[in-house]
Image (cartoon, grey):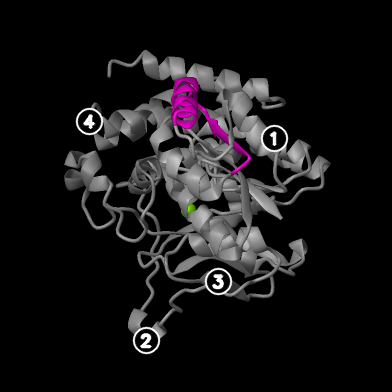
Amino acid sequence: MDISILGATGSIGLQAINVAKSLGIRVKAIAGGTDFQKMIPLIISLKPDLAAMYNEQAALSLREFASNSPNFPKTKIVAGMDGLLDCAVTADLLLNAVVGSVGLKPTLAALTAKKEVALANKETLVAAGSLVMETARQNGVQIRPIDSEHSAIWQCLAGAEKESVDSLILTASGGAFRNKNKAEIALLKAKDALKHPNWDMGAKITIDCATMVNKGLEYIEAHWLFDMPYERIKIVIHPQSIVHSMVQFKDGATLAQLGNPDMEQPIQYALTYPDRLPRATKPLDFCEIGELNFTAPDFDRFPALDLVIKAAKTGGTMPAIVNKVNELLVAQFLRGKIGFYDISGYLAEAIAKHSVMPITSIENVIAAEEWATEWVKGLAI
Ligand code: MG
């Protein structure tokens, strides 16, 4: 088996490259966004057939670098969405780890080409879950989740009849601000939110953890991946991030998947499924852990989570709106342009203003995202 990795220069992408190397899996194609400098060492070490830069200018810079470097690998350099789509269908398995809705078309392309798809790009399922799952079904492809919670549920569901499942329990660390009160949180800046207590991740998702929007997006992701009604998906705060998620069965049994916070385990499982191959890792030491705690989410301190849950249940274009508006607001928060609670404040306004439409094609998703982009542009930020 060979793989292609979209979002290769990001946190998940780099860890996926490590896992692929450790398993001896060939990385046939890689794609990055704008930072061509980060692609150079990856191309040199992996010698992929294809390398894509989503940003056309970055692709030109990369080509120029390659043509001026005599010993550079003979990798074909492609650009833009067409480049991502080429990468998406070139290997046996697509590992899609781009951030944001730009991942949607490559995922659909890989499914249509009947490639295996390992998905870390949760925004794809949030914005267009019905389309993605329908495309997967039509092509007989099972999407392999990489998000740690969904991988945990997937692992717990192995061998289970769908009818035997009562509910899914998503665990949440609570993010960087979980122990702060509302008045303190209101004053915190991006740099405070970027210190995630358990996981080392990219900036966007780390802010999403602090607002708990991430858990709302994962709630939608779980709904689509496991075809589970929202009423049967629960969220519980678990600050140690050891129980990665759980499945409750109708007979009263609950299965949990546990592990140290380490994305390479779910990545490896997605690549080796249904096999479990040995991996150099520190096993859990329960005596060292001592105790595991669970509490209910606090919607008063983290109102964005409540908003995303309600948007999920509204359905249609609403999750796509919430996803895109949040993505743009997080970028403004990272630039110091808006405060922490402005994210939930503006999200609530966008939800109130948007007229929901059904999603029957990719055009509906694109239109919803354009509406969201225009709406955020119109704000006095
Ligand atoms: Mg997660």
Q: Which mark is residue 256?
A: 3
Judge whether residue 65 is colored magenta.
Answer: yes
Q: Which residues are magenta?
A: 48-68
Q: Earlier in the sequence, mark 2 or mark 3?
A: 3
Real-space Cα separation, disc 2 to disc 4, in angstroms: 42 Å
- Residue at 75%, 43% (x, y): give it: 136
Amino acid type at circle 4 is Gly
Looking at the image, residue 131 sits to the left or right of residue 311; the answer is right
Real-space Cα separation, disc 3 to disc 1, in angstroms: 31 Å
Q: Are marks 3 and 1 in contact (CB under 8 Å)?
A: no
Q: Quadrant of residue 367?
A: top right
- Residue at 46%, 74% (x, y): give it: 281
Frontmost of labels 4 and 1 is 1
Q: Residues within 10 Å of mark 3 (few under 14, many from 20)?
A: some
Real-space Cα separation, disc 1 to disc 2, in angstroms: 45 Å
Q: Is mark 1 within 8 Å of ligand 1?
A: no
**What residue is shown with label 1?**
108
Real-space Cα separation, disc 3 to disc 4, in angstroms: 39 Å
Q: Quadrant of the C terminus?
A: top left
Amino acid type at circle 2 is Cys
